[in-house]
Image (spheres, rainbow, N blue to C red):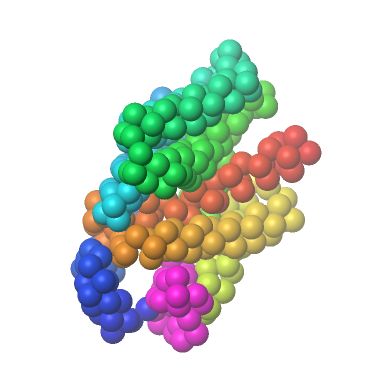
Amino acid sequence: MTSSIEAVDSAARAEAGGPTLAPRSLPLRIATTVVAVPVVVALAWTGGLLFLGFALVVLALALREFNILLESRGLHPHWKAGMAAVLLAPVAAFQRVRTGRIEEWHLGALLTILVVGVLLAELRRGAGKHAIANSAATLLGVFYVGWLGTHLVSLRELPWAMGEPYARGGPYALLPFALVWCCDSAAYLVGKAIGRRRLMPEVSPKKTAEGAWAGLLAAIAAAFAARATFAPFLTLADAAVLGLLVGVFGQLGDLVESLLKRDLDAKDTSQLIPGHGGVLDRFDSLFFAAPIVYYYLLYRVVSP
């Protein structure tokens, strides 16, 4: 992950007509992290409407970035339908757990309305306007950002569903953040320092095999550290398995986003977060890690 690689990649994108963004600054990246981490920890520990509001803002910004990238390639996603679905999904999950008044079939109804609404909206545009691509792009954004991201809220509200003290939802919600942060940091630093073998150069030319192994080991170590500090409900086996799963799937989530950006000729989804790129750039791994942690805790820890 060197400056020369970044320069070549940036020049290639400029030649291809894609957006060219300045390389990320490590000091700025660290400064932003120092400010953001306590805020996220406080929100996760508090839960309730504050954490729900945080999740809604993240998902709305991530979908906005995704749609802007799609439009830069000539696609026309349905903003209103997609945004409504992305915002309603976590609210529905929150409401269902809190009150028990929303049954499982409501999710099916929401998805049915979404699919039918998107197709009817495309019909209104008429023929010859990439109907299949626009519809598929809208639904991909909803499921990628909205459905996967909703698991952040589901994790925080899991104690309500299982009859546990609500405070335990704080550690539940923090687990994917802690493991992904450690994984990403180790992969970035080790890859930058000693990375030589490109992991998937056609997808992400800066990611290295050395960095990926470091990220995996860091995720496992972070799971054991979490068990020793804020997540004592994990057994040693739980920590090892959860760290391994997040270390693998979190990095796969990062590569998937890189694949999508490569297809859309973009280096970052935006420059909203100083030193880190866009919201989608920072939450791509979490969108894969949160469901992993949620289902693992649900079936192996909370209700074994």
Q: Position of residue 145 (x, y in %)?
A: 44, 43
Quadrant housing residue 6:
bottom left
Across and down, in percent, residue 113 comes to: 49, 24
* Residue at the image position 78 percent from the left and 39 percent from the top: 304
**Chain part drawn in magenta:** 183-208
Q: Is residue 193 above or below residue 82?
A: below
In the depicted view, which residue is nearer to us: 15 or 95?
Answer: 15
**From the viewer's perspective, is residue 62 above or below residue 110?**
below
18 sits left or right of 139 in the view: left
User: Could you tell me which quadrant the N terminus lies in?
Assistant: bottom left
User: Can residue 185 be found in the magenta stretch?
Assistant: yes
Rendered residue at 73%/40% (across/down)? 299
The count of marks equals 0
In the displayed structure image, the side of residue 297 where residue 87 appears, left or right: left
Can the viewer see residue 58 in this picture? no
Q: Is residue 154 rendered to the left or right of residue 86?
A: right
Q: Nearer the viewer, residue 32 or 3?
A: 3
Q: Nearer the viewer, residue 164 or 154?
A: 154
Residue 65 picture location, percent across and down: 31, 48
Q: Quadrant of residue 56?
A: top left
